[in-house]
Image: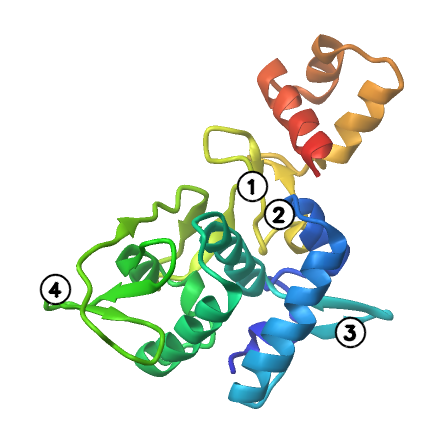
Amino acid sequence: MTSDNTLQIGQGIYTIREMAQILGQPYHRVYRWVNTYWDERLGESYGELYSWRVEGSQAVGFHTLVEFYLLILFGEAGVAPRKVLEAHRELYQLKGTPFPFANREVLKSLRTDGTHIYFELPDGEIMTLDGTRQLNMEFVELFFKKLSFDTEGMASSFWPLGKEKAIVVDPARKFGHPLIAGHNIYPETLLDHFKAGDPIPYIAHVYQLSEQQVADALEFCQAA
């Protein structure tokens, strides 16, 4: 396992509650994912946990957060968590990274038909990632429009509402807390003003933001 599963500056620090807010998922579901799927089942395979403890709270790094986003996408496509874990294990062996779902090359080559997960090899062959490696050309391509990548092809930032919105999660800034893109302003700060009765034009003027950036911040907070 790489150093992403230890507390380090620039890796991002996300408690289970923060993960649930960023991903828009119930707390109990994310708690189960961390403990049952990533720490217990995958961690047992790899010999290390994906989470650690921060002042009594359980937390993970940025790449684990990204992999959970992919778990959500597969779930929406109808793929069972068991199939996702099987694909993760095979890609770990194939690509040599404990975070294959945060790798650009892997993401570009993943396919699903709503039941199985497929990986397109460089020679064009399609292999199923469920232990059988049977050829099946019927698949639906997933597009991952909420991620940016670094020069090594690993996910470097996550846009919870999509890149057309102003909210970004960057592990190199403010410990990975969601921010207004291009600013060190927390969305919750703008929400507090709005709850206090300040109108959007006033908030935008005070923080030198566009009204759309403020609206995006409020949308993110309300979704979370």
Mark 1 element type = loop
Query: In the depicted view, which residue is nearer to us: 105 or 177?
Result: 105
Dots 1, 2 in contact, CB < 8 A: yes
Quarter of the image that includes the C terminus:
top right
On residue 23, the disc is 2
Horizontal side, residue 112 vs residue 217: left or right: left
* Residue underneath mark 1: 160
The residue shown at (39%, 47%) is: 144
Which is more N-terminal, label 2 or label 4? 2
120, above or below 20, in the image:
below
Which is more N-terminal, label 2 or label 3? 2
Which is more N-terminal, label 1 or label 3? 3
Q: Classify 10 Å Cα crowding around label 4: few (below 14), some (14-19), many (20 and above).
A: few
The residue shown at (87%, 13%) is: 197
Which is more N-terminal, label 3 or label 4? 3
Q: Quadrant of residue 186?
A: top right
The amino acid sitting under disc 4 is Gly
Which is more N-terminal, label 4 or label 1? 4
* Residue underneath mark 4: 124
5, above or below 118, in the image:
below
* Residue underneath mark 3: 53
Horizontal side, residue 16 vs residue 96: left or right: right
Front position among marks 4 and 3: 4
**Residue 164 x/y as whole percent:** 46, 28
Which is more N-terminal, label 2 or label 1? 2
